[in-house]
Image (spheres, rainbow, N blue to C red):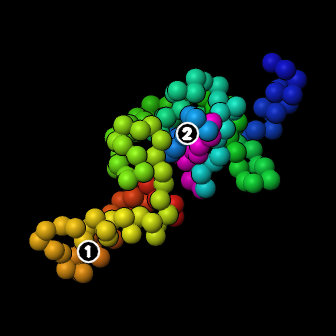
Amino acid sequence: MPLIAEIRSINVTRATGKIVRFDEVRGYGFITPDMGGDDVFLHANDLEMEKRQATRGARVSFGVEEGDRGKFATEVRLSTDTQPARTSNTLATDAGSPNDEYFDVFSTEEFAHVVTERLLKITPPLTSQQILAIRSNFEELARKHGLVDS
C-alpha cells in the first residue's frame, strides 16, 4: 500500500450504507449511510470494486472524509453485511425507462407536481381531497425510500 493511502486510511472513519444513485457515465453518485445523516458523495475514482457493481441499492462499506463541499466516500467496497440490497425495480419516472440503472431523485416539489399531474388524468376524476390524500401518502413513501430529497 502506498504511504499516502496508508496515512489516509488511518484518518478515515469506516461506515456502511447503500448506493442511492450512481451515474456510470459521469462517474459519480451518492451513498445513504446506515448511521443516518446526509448522503455522502461517491466518485468512481474511490471505488475498490468494478464500476458496474456500483448500482442503486448496492450495499457498501466506505471511508468518510470531510471536504470543502461536504462529506465524500473513499475506499468504497461491496459490503459483506447480511442486509439485502434493494433491486432496481423502483418507481419509473418520466426521466427514464424502468430498465435504466440511473434514477433521478426529485425534490419534494417536483415529486408532488408529477404525482398531481398523474392523478388529474385518472377517470373518473378524483376530488381535490382525494388527490391531496393520495399525494401525501406517496410523498411519505418516496421519502422513506430515498426517492425524493428531503
- Residue 16 appears in view: no
Instruction: Tell me the SS state at disc 1.
Output: helix
Locate the N terminus by quadrant. Answer: top right
What's the residue type where badge 2 is placed?
Asp
Residue pointed to by mark 2: 23
> Would you say 62 lies left or right of 84 here?
right
Q: CA distance from mark 2 to mark 1?
A: 33 Å
Vertical relation: 9 (above or below) 28: above
Q: Please state the extent of the stretch shown in magenta in the rendering.
A: 27-37
Image point (56%, 53%), residue name: 36
Count of labels in the image: 2
What number is the disc on residue 22?
Answer: none
Instruction: Tell me the SS state at disc 2.
Output: strand
Q: Measured from the top left, where is residue 15 in percent x and y?
A: 63, 40
> Would you say 84 lies left or right of 79 here?
left
Q: Which numbered disc, 2 or 1, marks the residue that appears first in the sequence?
A: 2
What's the residue type where badge 1 is placed?
Ile
Q: Residues within 10 Å of mark 2 (few under 14, many from 20)?
A: many
Residue closer to the observer: 148 or 84: 148
Image point (29%, 76%), residue name: 132
Q: Is residue 72 magenta?
A: no
Q: Measured from the top left, where is residue 112 in percent x and y?
A: 39, 69
- Residue 110 appears in view: yes
* Occupied quadrant, residue 133: bottom left
Q: Is residue 30 magenta?
A: yes
Q: Residues within 10 Å of mark 1 (few under 14, many from 20)?
A: some
Q: Measured from the top left, where is residue 76 in percent x and y?
A: 64, 32
Image point (70%, 36%), residue name: 74
Residue pointed to by mark 1: 131
Image point (33%, 65%), residue name: 115
